[in-house]
């Protein structure tokens, strides 16, 4: 089964930290007291296999902790009416916070422990501060956080630089707006077309300005402040960073590869663009780390990307333009578009479920409709592999209500989630169930010695 981005990668990052502090040799790691989480004078009698004293734990943030695509989706489709529901937030049962909560070392009976899983795919910092953290109970012993990436407009970067669901020229935007006004397409008249006309370099410049802005720094500090209001006096907050998904040696073979959604006007995965995207991830992580340092000893930053050695896209010797099933590429940390689920589901299918608002899935399908407004004859790349669409009209058939609440699926389910949501790395001769045990245990061990 597939895994959460951060359950796997947090484990990798924490493995080094756990090994750096042999249990029983010291009661602290830097400024962090090993006994803080446990509220005890010493750990001499502490059994790391028994974490049942943790009775209140929460997870807040975006898709990296919601675990989109990791295992089975929680909730049911009818929950679409509730924007904070498991289904609408795309929470999955192999997200790392969910697995930590259900681990037997926290007690055989989860009902004796309250776990508030509030992470929501597509969430920005404002959502975490105003919609998620205020719903948590007070006196949390552990809070897991993942936030900041969506504020840097990750979805717009994916659109302009990688998938091009909608990448228009300024002239095309003028034409679409004129058509919208002439034909009274309400949603298109009021839509902000600015981001779809930025181009890749323009979008990267725009995102970099956001990340380096005072507003972004203040937003991170707001997360810290809000989390402290729900944290027990001996509690800990663990804030995970983000992963670079391009190989760091910038293999030139990828310069001629395109993952564009449409047949024409393809964007290519050039070395320059890949490096800029990787650099932005490093910058975001550095900003989060700075906010965590200023927050004090009850906060810890987990930069798991620093501990990844390989397993990214566009590494030497890999043909990223291949149409063959690469589902089990050795060591790959991310989902492959051309690979089946371990359950045999086709990534080229179009689900019948309604799209959850505010998610990458919804955004990419709105983008696709915008492309059809600009070019009604546009053809999707790989159309022959896709299942039939749930929408048989044209983009002009949208009403304002439909574009907001019932976006039809044109883009296959696996387009962005499978390519850029991290999965467990696949070493040879190790089954998925065996891999699950290894990295999950490291996460729990990290908690047990209070370095997570």
Image (tube, grey):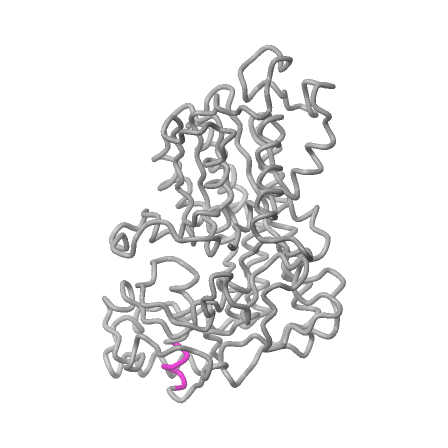
Give the magenta part as a residue range: 370-375
Foreground of the two, 366 or 119: 119
Q: Position of residue 250 (x, y in %)?
A: 74, 66
Q: Position of residue 13 (x, y in %)?
A: 66, 42
Give the left or right position of residue 246, taking residue 80 as reference. Answer: right
Foreground of the two, 307 or 424: 424
Residue found at x 25% / y 79%? 397
Residue found at x 46% / y 54%? 68
Foreground of the two, 395 or 116: 116
Locate residue 77: give its quadrant.
bottom left
Q: Position of residue 145 (x, y in %)?
A: 50, 40
Q: Say if the magenta span includes residue 329.
A: no
- Residue 294 visible to the viewer: no
Count of marks placed on residues: 0
Q: Say if the magenta span includes residue 372.
A: yes
Foreground of the two, 205 or 163: 163
- Residue 67 visible to the viewer: yes
Residue found at x 45% / y 82%? 383
**Quarter containing the C terminus:** top right
Residue found at x 65% / y 38%? 14
Rendered position, 395 above or below 238: below
Q: Residue furthest bottom?
A: 377
Rendered position, 396 above or below 447: below
Q: Residue furthest top?
A: 41
Q: Position of residue 332 (x, y in %)?
A: 64, 59
The dominant secondary structure in magenta is: helix
Give the left or right position of residue 43, taking residue 160 as reference. Answer: right
């Amino acid at each position: 089964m597939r895994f959460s981005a951060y359950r796997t990668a947090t484990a990798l990052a924490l493995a080094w930290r756990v090994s750096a502090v042999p249990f029983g040799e010291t009661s602290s790691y830097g400024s962090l007291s090993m006994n803080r989480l446990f509220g005890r004078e010493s750990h001499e009698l502490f059994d790391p296999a028994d974490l049942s004293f943790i009775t209140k734990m929460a997870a807040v943030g975006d898709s990296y902790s919601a675990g989109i695509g990791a295992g089975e989706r929680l909730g049911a489709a009818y929950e679409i009416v509730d924007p904070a529901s498991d289904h609408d937030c795309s929470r999955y049962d192999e997200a790392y916070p969910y697995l930590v909560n259900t681990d037997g070392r926290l007690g055989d009976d989860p009902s004796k422990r309250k776990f508030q899983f509030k992470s929501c795919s597509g969430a920005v910092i404002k959502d975490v501060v105003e919609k998620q953290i205020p719903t948590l109970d007070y006196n949390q012993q552990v809070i897991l956080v993942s936030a900041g990436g969506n504020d840097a407009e990750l979805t717009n970067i994916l659109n302009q630089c990688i998938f091009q669901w909608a990448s228009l020229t300024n002239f095309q935007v003028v034409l679409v707006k004129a058509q919208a006004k002439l034909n009274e397409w309400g949603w298109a008249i009021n839509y902000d077309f600015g981001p779809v006309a930025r181009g890749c370099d323009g979008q990267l410049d725009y995102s970099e300005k956001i990340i380096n802005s005072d507003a972004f720094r203040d937003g991170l500090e707001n997360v810290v402040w809000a989390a402290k209001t729900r944290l027990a006096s001996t509690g800990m907050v663990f804030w995970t960073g983000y992963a670079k998904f391009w190989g760091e040696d910038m293999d030139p073979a990828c310069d001629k590869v395109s993952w564009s959604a449409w047949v024409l006007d393809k964007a290519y995965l050039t070395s320059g663009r890949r490096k800029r995207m990787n650099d932005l991830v490093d910058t975001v992580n550095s900003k989060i780390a700075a906010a965590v340092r200023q927050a004090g000893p009850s906060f810890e930053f987990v930069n798991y990307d620093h501990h990844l050695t390989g397993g990214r896209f566009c590494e030497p010797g890999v043909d990223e333009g291949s149409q063959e099933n690469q589902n089990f590429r050795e060591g790959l940390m991310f989902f492959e578009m051309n690979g089946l689920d371990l359950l045999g589901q086709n990534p080229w299918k179009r689900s019948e479920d309604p799209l959850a608002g505010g998610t990458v899935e919804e955004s990419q399908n709105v983008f696709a409709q915008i492309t059809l407004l600009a070019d009604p004859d546009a053809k999707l790349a790989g159309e022959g592999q896709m299942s039939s669409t749930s929408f048989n009209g044209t983009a002009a058939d949208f009403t304002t209500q439909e574009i907001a609440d019932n976006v039809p699926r044109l883009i296959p389910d696996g387009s962005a989630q499978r390519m850029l949501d991290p999965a467990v790395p696949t070493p040879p001769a190790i089954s998925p169930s065996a891999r699950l045990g290894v990295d999950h245990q490291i996460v729990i061990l990290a908690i047990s010695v209070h370095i997570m």
